[in-house]
């Protein structure tokens, strides 16, 4: 089982370059960061974890700027979004950003995607929350077309364009892996458009994951790789996920200034080393 880090990179915490360098130096294989374009002040959508919404949601850096900085100081670390909110993203710009990250990192980009939960945030982007699942599927198909065809053409429900040129193309063949985030409602999307399931730890705890994996295999007709996002790093949690055949755990790193972040990383690395 591989170990990585998931976190929010904000203007108040450790900068992306020293964070990525520290994550790689401590032997982790991946760094995935969260995206929110903004948070509406008048928000009616409840925070999925319950309670007040932490201010890190308001303050995230642009993920591809941050990941580009991370790529410049690392050599092996997988760099990805956890997750990119495709319902709020133009498919042309997004295809170019992911492919550009893959190019500058030497083929280390991971495109973690999700449908999001904040309806008011989506609406500010002109997205109808009731159709967000279909919109994500359509945009993902369009993005994949832009990545893989010299003259890309796509005609879908929400995205429609005649032949275009779009470069750069990704370094990875056929394209960076798409890790589909969410709960069991995402299984059809994982099956049709994903290379892995990016399971959220609070929706897929060890005592529930076994039956979920069986249902995912039934939907997909194959064994799907699973990465668990925002996992705890205590020994019992790690061992239980390992017994279930999880490919990767992304340990949650709180957003702190640099010195505190490095201390947290040291503690997480010590726990991971016991299971290496």
Image: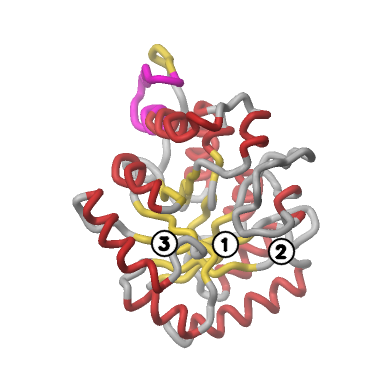
At 56% from the left edge and 75% from the top edge, which residue is drawn?
26
Residue with the mark numbered 1: 6
Q: In the image, residue 265 lies at what x, y percent? A: 63, 75
Q: Secondary structure at mark 1?
A: strand
Contact? badges 2 and 1 (CB < 8 Å) = no
**Which tag, 2 or 1, sits closer to the chain's start?**
1
- Identify the disc placed on residue 255: 2
- Identify the disc placed on residue 227: 3
Which residue is more in the foreground, 18 or 271?
271
Point out the stretch of residues depicted in magenta.
142-159
Of the 4 image quadrants, the one containing the N terminus is bottom left
Mark 3 residue crowding within 10 angstroms, few (<14) / some (14–19) / many (20+): many
Indicate left or right for 62 with 236 as reference. Answer: right
Indicate left or right for 29 with 1 as reference. Answer: right
Q: In the image, residue 171 lies at what x, y percent? A: 40, 43
Indicate left or right for 224 with 251 as reference. Answer: left
Calculate the distance from the C-alpha at mark 2 to the C-alpha at mark 1.
Answer: 10 Å
């Amino acid at each position: 089982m591989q170990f990585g880090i998931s976190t929010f990179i904000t203007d108040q915490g450790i900068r992306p370059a020293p964070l990525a360098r520290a994550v790689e130096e401590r032997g982790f294989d991946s760094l995935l960061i969260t995206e929110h374009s903004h948070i509406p002040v008048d928000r009616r959508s409840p925070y999925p974890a319950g309670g007040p919404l932490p201010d890190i949601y308001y303050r995230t850096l642009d993920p591809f700027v941050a990941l580009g900085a991370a790529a410049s100081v690392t050599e092996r670390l997988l760099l990805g979004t956890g997750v990119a909110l495709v319902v709020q993203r133009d498919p042309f710009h997004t295809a170019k950003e992911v492919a550009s990250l893959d190019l500058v990192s030497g083929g280390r980009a991971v495109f973690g995607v999700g449908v999001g939960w904040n309806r008011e945030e989506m609406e500010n982007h002109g997205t109808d929350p009731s159709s967000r699942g279909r919109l994500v599927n359509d945009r993902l198909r369009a993005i994949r077309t832009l990545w893989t065809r010299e003259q890309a053409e796509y005609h879908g429900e929400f995205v429609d364009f005649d032949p275009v040129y779009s470069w750069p193309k990704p370094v990875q063949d056929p394209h960076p892996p798409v890790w589909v985030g969410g709960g069991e409602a995402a299984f059809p999307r994982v099956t049709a458009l994903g290379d892995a399931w990016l399971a959220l730890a609070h929706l897929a705890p060890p005592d529930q994951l076994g039956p979920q994996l069986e249902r995912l295999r039934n939907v997909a007709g194959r064994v799907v790789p699973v990465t668990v996002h925002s996992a705890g790093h205590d020994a019992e949690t790690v061992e239980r996920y390992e017994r279930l055949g999880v490919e990767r755990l992304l340990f949650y790193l709180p957003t702190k200034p640099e010195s505190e972040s490095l201390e947290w990383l040291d503690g997480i690395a010590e726990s991971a080393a016991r299971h290496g």
